[in-house]
Image (tube, coloured by chain):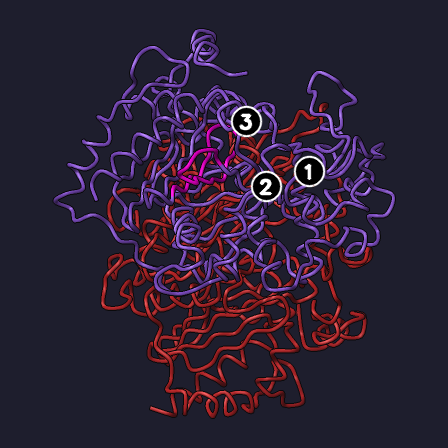
Chain colours: A purple, B red
Amino acid sequence: MATLASTGALAQTATLSARESDPKVMGWMVGFPPPKNKIITQPDSVYFSFPKLRWSVCHMREFLPTEQISRGLGAPSSMEYLPPSEFADERQAIDALEFMPIDGDTDMTWEGSLYANYTDGMLILHKGRVVYERYFGCLDEAGKHASMSMTKSLTGLLAQILVAEGQLDENAVVMDIIPEINGSAFANATVRQVMDMTTGLRYSEDYSDPNADIWVYSAAANPLPKPEDYTGPNGYWEYLQQVQPEGKHGEAFHYKTVNSDMLGWIISRVSGKAVTELASERLWRPMGAEQDAYMNVDGLGVPFAGGGLSAGLRDLGRLGLLMLNEGVIDGKRLFPASVVQRIRAGGDPDKFGTNYPALTGGSYTSMWWIYPGKDEVFAARGVHGQTVYVDPSAQMVLVRFASFPRPENPLIDPTSLPAFQAVADYLKAKR
Amino acid sequence: MATLASTGALAQTATLSARESDPKVMGWMVGFPPPKNKIITQPDSVYFSFPKLRWSVCHMREFLPTEQISRGLGAPSSMEYLPPSEFADERQAIDALEFMPIDGDTDMTWEGSLYANYTDGMLILHKGRVVYERYFGCLDEAGKHASMSMTKSLTGLLAQILVAEGQLDENAVVMDIIPEINGSAFANATVRQVMDMTTGLRYSEDYSDPNADIWVYSAAANPLPKPEDYTGPNGYWEYLQQVQPEGKHGEAFHYKTVNSDMLGWIISRVSGKAVTELASERLWRPMGAEQDAYMNVDGLGVPFAGGGLSAGLRDLGRLGLLMLNEGVIDGKRLFPASVVQRIRAGGDPDKFGTNYPALTGGSYTSMWWIYPGKDEVFAARGVHGQTVYVDPSAQMVLVRFASFPRPENPLIDPTSLPAFQAVADYLKAKR
């Protein structure tokens, strides 16, 4: 369980603060060539370790094969901003907001929280207008950043759209859609159980156990050519076919990335389109994205539906607006309102459990996090601090890209969730 | 030496015609997952062999790490088209044009030449307007295609811009700009010799010799992690530091890709920017490209300045317009007219030699091909049929992406160059 105390402990053991570990300060990859000790390269155990990961989160495609999510060829949709005369004042006001971290004993400012959480990009929209936008570290407005597990929410949204349109039956069992999953624990899970991650699967992420499933999964997913003596599964989809059961489907929420890969396969099979194509046709093109996005792929060209998305900050702002406004952006409806209504209705809080202290009482459904509390906040979340946070009560969308040293969002929640609430309260008061 | 006879021989030995080898007909990568025998994957000896290469030329990023050439975030520049009422007629008229292939004895139609050359995309601009545009195989208007050695012309253009601006001294020797090249054959070559590929370098591309330089170069350039026992150079730039001399600099044109990698390093060193960044800042952003482009990178993140570019067909049309109009597009000047004037002035035809039968009497300068003849045609060219062909006398720009089975443009010239000339003559007659 994460508390500010453990965050404090981290701060003591982590050698470098956000400012100290800023990739520009570190001088990563500067020069032609950079000095040898400033070059970031393979393998991922190197390029994705702190502090190097603070550079790498903006450069995933430079390490790995990727597939494009095309924005199409037209002009991007315009994004409304506060008038320039108000924008600077609003930033100053928000930066100065104070809040009490969870389990903390001293107030922190909003701006302080950005550094506490190793923020790379922060965008806040209120009533459809950008009221706050800042970039740090490796990111700028024309850059793209790893979304990590926010990718799951993209996959879940696409699935929910197909459900609403009747293309995907959430009550079907997976084997009815993908017969070759027979023999895997997924075979008799319903699509809804996969979407809500209430499947009963054996999938250990114990990194200290060399036989843990995560290592088999990683080897299968690795897009580099397999070693000659490799006998394991090749790619996400072969891996899924040999997942074993553990416990019963439908009983409890277990956060396991393989559900998202399974869902990615399901929506590709029923739609006849890769997740990247679906994301382009249903979202990036019609929402008027200003940048292409991309997804990492395995060695067979399958996009990583559980974590492979990299995108621009403002484009995830557009995605957040679509969620806030129940499928409408720029006056155009992209999908039925029932899609977001179903997500906001949430899953079963009893099944959600207490593994995520700051979210107890909430739930996880269609690969979105439903927060507890009367404001009906819901969010996409990814390790190292990624979030698209939608607060309908404040008509607020907040997007954060970050590169927090450790891959544990519970360490970040204490200085994030009350900070987001403080901004929401401030914006509500302005009405 | 290539003649239509050898092209005919090829047609006999090649098992599949353009229509037969169309990736859609072959069914590559269709299905979730595709049938095992329809999956295209590593290594490059597989994915870049005919007929698979006809799919792979549109999907380079799905195999390899890449770096973006950003188009920026604004609206693309508009591209003027013939009025719709005239467009279909014009296509019909051009498709029906007839020409005699070099060394041929039977006329061929323009449309026939598209199939003879395994064309994936063809764009023709006349007086700044699109008069002809067709897509085949793996390509569509929102797709990107490997440009192969046309990348060299991009690198050369950027270098010529820096020369015109006084940032790069074409008379300097490479060692004055990059001291660590000392010990390599490049050390005492001038920048101009590198730009014109009149350096004297030992660089064998004898694929049948396992010790040929091409293999050392390929191993150095491969972005995948090196084998544990690997002791060779790492990346393009380490490779360049150990290139040995062969013959004298300045005496003759020898087409060797390493010159382009050297030039990429030179322009990065003097500008402080990667080739991708320079291409974005100087060309893709200001010309209003409608798609980002990208370049393959080596294992240290260095873009492949000799062949790594993938781009959209119409964006290379914009690049062609910039060349035709000496630096101006959409009424905006991007670089001095002297840049194109210097390229069009050409190199020394005596040094060019007779290795390229259809181009004898022409030259190669700043990594552009200057064609013989009074029309002052010049072009970017890449293996498997890529070209940006500029005919100032006809105010014509022609861009072709293709996936001809063999990597030898001299096999394609006999059914391409007279075809281009036929279109140019047709367009001239319309004035």
Q: Which chain carries label 3?
A: A
Q: Where is residue A363 in the image (x, y as percent from the top left)?
A: 56, 36
| B199 in relation to B359, above or below | above
**Magenta residue span:** A371-391
Q: Label 3 belongs to which residue?
A: A47
Q: Is mark 2 on a helix, strand or loop?
A: loop
Of labels 1 and 3, earlier in sequence is: 3
Residue in view at x 63 percent, y 43 percent: A304
| Mark 1 and mark 2 on one chain | yes
Give the amino acid at mark 2: Gly
Check disc 2 and report the residue beneath it: A347
Image depth: mark 3 or mark 2 in front: 2
Same subunit, tags 1 and 3: yes
User: Residue visible at 30% across and 47% down?
Assistant: B162
Q: Which of marks 3 and 2 is nearer the N terminus?
A: 3
Above or below for B160 versus B239: below
Task: Quickly name the residue at label 1.
Answer: A198
The amino acid on which the numbered mark 1 sits, given as a three-letter code, is: Thr
Q: Do the residues labelled 1 and 2 touch (CB within 8 Å)?
A: yes
**Magenta segment includes A114:** no
Give coordinates of residue B117: x percent, y percent. Answer: 63, 73
Mark 3 and 2 residues: CB-CB less than 8 Å, in contact? Answer: no
